[in-house]
Every structure is written in structure tokens, then in C-alpha cells.
Image (cartoon, rainbow, N blue to C red):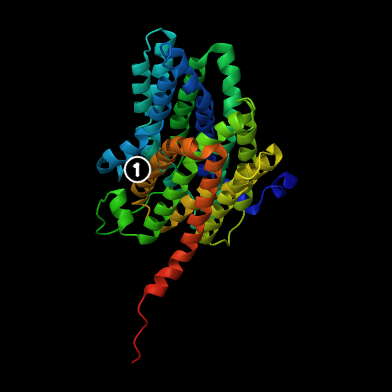
């Protein structure tokens, strides 16, 4: 038993010693695995429902409906939900997502599901995703002191990355054996498990600040320049990442002449690198988060540069593995900065506002990736994305220097 404990870094031992967080991590891991299955199942079910010749249209609409309405929900429902209890937010999202996905699976089994109905149910299922994520990380901030939040965020992020690695292969087996509706139903059940298990998590109560006013997430961010700057930096980073999701598949198929299955190997090495990088970074306690975030952005951009100069699968795959290694810590560090800078009462609204921007940034970048690939080609687009990302990191590092340089010199007395 002691030997097993010695294998776990102290940062994670302290986090896992909190019973409430262990329960939260367990039920969130189940829901993450369910969403890992849906990476394949959502698209495959859309293909089964699509009329002849319209598969691409239906699949694109289904994938968008499974994520983009979260940004709308974060904005439209801010007035009602910004002061809601964190556990209520997570539970409401779990019940809505599980109910909508379960209904889609049931209607398909009964032969009553149409493409329009399917897309509508997916859109409903994603309305509270930003609020559910905000609730999860607000619970982390209430269950753990500030010095342990990075480790907790890292464990949650690592479990999500691991689920993305394991989920698609498991979904392939399940779809082949029973059909796509079964995999969607499993995802629905994973959210119901989350809602049920979360009821047993004891969360310390937080007293409201005297005279505190209820404000929207974006209004709160406007009062905190450091958070607003971090959100802008993260949004541009995600925007510049978006074209990668379009260019990488075409790089594999068109430039390398490989089958589409080979794309899975690229994402697998990225995922393994992200898991390792996230776990290693979670053990660090004396790293300044803002400079570390800039270093991560620069490292990810540099990892994409080899795609513009070589078609060697070993070199480009190694680049993506290194990219995963340096990107792995980014989500946990990013969330930790918000947790440290926002008050507990304001944190759900602030994180939901952040989630709405993050949810929209990657699809917008992916939409720009299509014209970029047509203009520059897949390898040129990956090179341009990497170069622009490195430039972003340089500008973020020089920003404070430029601000100080523009300030007038103090007058002598």
C-alpha cells in the first residue's frame, strides 16, 4: 500500500485525499468516456439518417448542433443561471444532455427519428454545456484550496483526454455490434450517472460578498483586465488551432497519400503526448501560470512548423506528439488562472462566458481552414497556423513591455 502511494506524486495525493473531489472525478470521467463514444456515434447515426446524397450536409449539421448551441446558451441564459449553485448547473446539464440523447436513441430504435428531429435534439442537448463545465470547475474551487486546484484541474483534463483516446475505438466496436443508437444511448446513460453520483458530493457553502451585485459573465470580465486579456489570448489561440482540424486530414490523405485510417495514428500520438504533458505539469507548484501559458502556445505553434517543410511521417508525427506534450498542461493552467482571479460567487458566470467564446472559436477557425487549404494547400495551412501561433505567443510576451514603454515617464519632483 505504501509503495502504491509513493508512485503517486504528492500534488495528486493531496487532491485525491478529498473525498468530494474523488467522487466528482469519478462521475465526470464516466461522462467524458460517454462523450468519447459520441465522437464516432453522433456522425455515424447522422449518416444512417441522411437521405441519399446529403450525408455530408447532415453530418456537418449534427456535429455543429452537438457543440455550437453551448455558446448561445451561455449568452441567452446568463441572467437566469449566473448565480445558480454550481452543483445545480452540472446536474441540469447532465439531465438535459442525457435526456435529449436518450430520446434520440429511443426514437431511432423505434424508427421515428428524422434528420431534422435528430439535429434539433442534439442542439437541445448542448444548450447547457458551457454552464455544466463552469459548474464543474466551480465545484473544484470550492472543494479544494488554491494550491491544489492545478492538480485537480489536471486530473479532470487528463481523464477527458484519455476518454477521447479510448472512446472512438470503443464506439467503433459498439457500433459494429449493435448500431450507432446504442453508443448514443450509452453516452446518455453516462450523464445520468453523473447526475446521480453528484448528489452525494458535499460542497462547502460560500457566503455571498456584502453588497455584491448579480452581473453577467462578460460584464464581470470587463472589470478584470487580467481575465479579459487571458480570454482574448485563449480565444485567438483556439481560432488559430481551428484550421488544423481541416488541414491535417487532407495532409494525411492528399499529401501523404495514406488512407483516412492513418489519421487516427496522428491523433493518437497527440493524445498520448497530451496525457503525459498534463500529468507532469500538474505536479508543478511554483510555475507562473501566465508565462507558462505563453510558452505552451509557442511550443504548440513550433510543433506544427515541420508540416510545412517535410512529408516524413516520422518527423510530422513526432511533431504532433511534442505538440500534445506541450499542449497537455494548457487547459488546466488556463482554468486555474480563472479560478484564482474570480470570486466564488462570480465564477460560474465568468467560466460560462469563457466557455461560450471557446466553444465558438474552434469552429470559426475550422470554417476559415477550408479556404486556407484551397489557397495554401494542407501543408501550407499547417505551416501558416504554426507560424501565426508562434507570433501570437511573441506578441503576448511583449505586450507588458510595450505597455510600459508607452507610459509617460514620471516627472521629477
Q: Outermost residue toward the bottom?
A: 413
Mark 1 lies on residue: 85
Query: Element at badge 1?
Result: loop
Q: Is residue 11 left or right of residue 56?
A: right
Q: Is residue 95 left or right of residue 23?
A: left
Q: Outermost residue toward the right?
A: 3
Relative height, residue 261 to residue 139 (above, below): above
Relative height, residue 87 to residue 303 (above, below): above
Quadrant the C terminus occupies: bottom left
Q: Nearer the viewer, residue 273 or 174?
A: 273
Q: Residue 295, how many percent across, how many down? A: 56, 57
Give the residue at x 35% y 79%. Answer: 408
Quadrant the N terminus occupies: top right
Q: Outermost residue toward the front?
A: 375
Q: Nearer the viewer, residue 312 or 203?
A: 312
Q: How many marks?
A: 1
Mark 1 burial class by Cα count in 10 Å: few <14, some 14-19, many 20+: some
Q: Residue 18, how many percent across, how many down? A: 54, 47
- Residue 147 visible somewhere in the drawing: no
- Residue 6 visible somewhere in the drawing: yes
Q: Is residue 88 left or right of residue 389?
A: left
Q: Residue 283, how many percent across, how many down? A: 62, 53
Give the residue at x 26% y 56%. Answer: 212
Relative height, residue 303 to residue 360 (above, below): below
Q: Outermost residue toward the top?
A: 111
Residue 132, by quadrant, is top left
Amino acid at each position: 500500500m505504501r509503495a502504491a502511494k509513493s508512485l503517486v506524486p504528492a500534488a495528486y495525493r493531496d487532491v485525491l485525499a478529498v473525498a468530494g473531489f474523488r467522487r466528482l472525478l469519478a462521475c465526470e470521467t464516466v461522462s467524458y468516456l460517454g462523450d468519447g463514444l459520441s465522437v464516432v456515434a453522433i456522425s455515424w447515426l447522422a449518416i444512417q439518417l441522411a437521405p441519399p446524397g446529403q450525408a455530408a450536409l447532415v453530418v456537418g449539421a449534427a456535429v455543429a448542433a452537438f457543440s455550437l448551441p453551448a455558446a448561445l446558451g451561455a449568452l441567452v441564459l446568463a441572467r437566469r443561471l449566473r448565480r445558480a449553485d454550481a452543483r445545480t448547473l452540472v446536474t441540469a446539464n447532465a439531465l438535459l444532455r442525457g435526456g435529449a440523447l436518450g430520446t434520440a436513441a429511443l426514437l431511432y430504435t423505434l424508427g421515428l427519428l428524422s434528420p431534422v428531429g435528430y439535429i434539433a435534439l442534439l442542439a437541445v442537448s448542448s444548450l447547457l454545456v458551457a454552464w455544466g463545465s463552469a459548474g464543474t470547475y466551480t465545484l473544484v474551487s470550492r472543494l479544494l484550496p488554491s494550491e491544489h486546484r492545478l492538480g485537480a484541474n489536471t486530473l479532470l483534463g487528463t481523464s477527458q483526454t484519455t476518454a477521447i483516446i479510448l472512446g472512438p475505438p470503443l464506439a467503433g466496436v459498439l457500433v459494429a455490434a449493435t448500431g450507432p443508437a446504442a453508443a448514443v444511448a450509452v453516452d446518455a446513460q453516462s450523464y445520468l450517472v453523473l447526475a446521480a453520483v453528484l448528489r452525494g458530493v458535499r460542497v462547502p457553502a460560500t457566503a455571498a460578498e456584502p453588497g455584491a451585485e448579480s452581473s453577467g459573465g462578460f460584464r464581470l470580465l470587463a472589470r478584470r483586465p487580467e481575465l479579459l486579456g487571458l480570454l482574448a489570448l485563449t480565444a485567438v489561440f483556439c481560432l488559430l488551432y481551428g484550421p488544423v482540424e481541416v488541414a491535417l486530414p487532407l495532409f494525411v490523405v492528399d499529401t501523404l497519400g495514406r488512407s483516412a485510417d492513418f489519421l487516427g495514428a496522428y491523433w493518437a500520438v497527440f493524445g498520448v503526448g497530451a496525457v503525459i504533458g498534463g500529468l507532469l505539469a500538474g505536479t508543478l507548484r511554483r510555475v507562473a501560470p501566465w508565462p507558462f501559458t505563453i510558452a505552451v502556445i509557442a511550443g504548440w505553434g513550433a510543433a506544427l512548423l515541420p508540416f510545412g517543410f517535410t512529408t516524413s511521417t516520422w518527423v510530422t508525427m513526432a511533431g504532433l506528439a511534442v505538440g500534445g506534450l506541450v499542449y497537455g498542461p494548457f487547459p488546466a493552467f488556463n482554468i486555474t488562472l480563472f479560478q484564482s482571479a474570480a470570486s466564488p460567487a462570480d465564477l460560474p458566470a465568468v467560466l460560462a462566458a469563457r466557455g461560450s467564446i471557446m466553444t465558438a472559436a474552434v469552429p470559426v477557425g475550422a470554417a476559415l481552414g477550408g479556404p486556407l487549404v484551397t489557397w495554401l494547400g494542407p501543408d501550407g495551412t499547417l505551416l501558416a497556423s504554426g507560424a501565426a501561433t508562434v507570433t501570437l505567443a511573441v506578441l503576448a510576451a511583449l505586450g507588458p513591455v510595450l505597455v510600459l514603454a508607452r507610459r509617460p515617464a514620471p516627472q521629477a519632483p
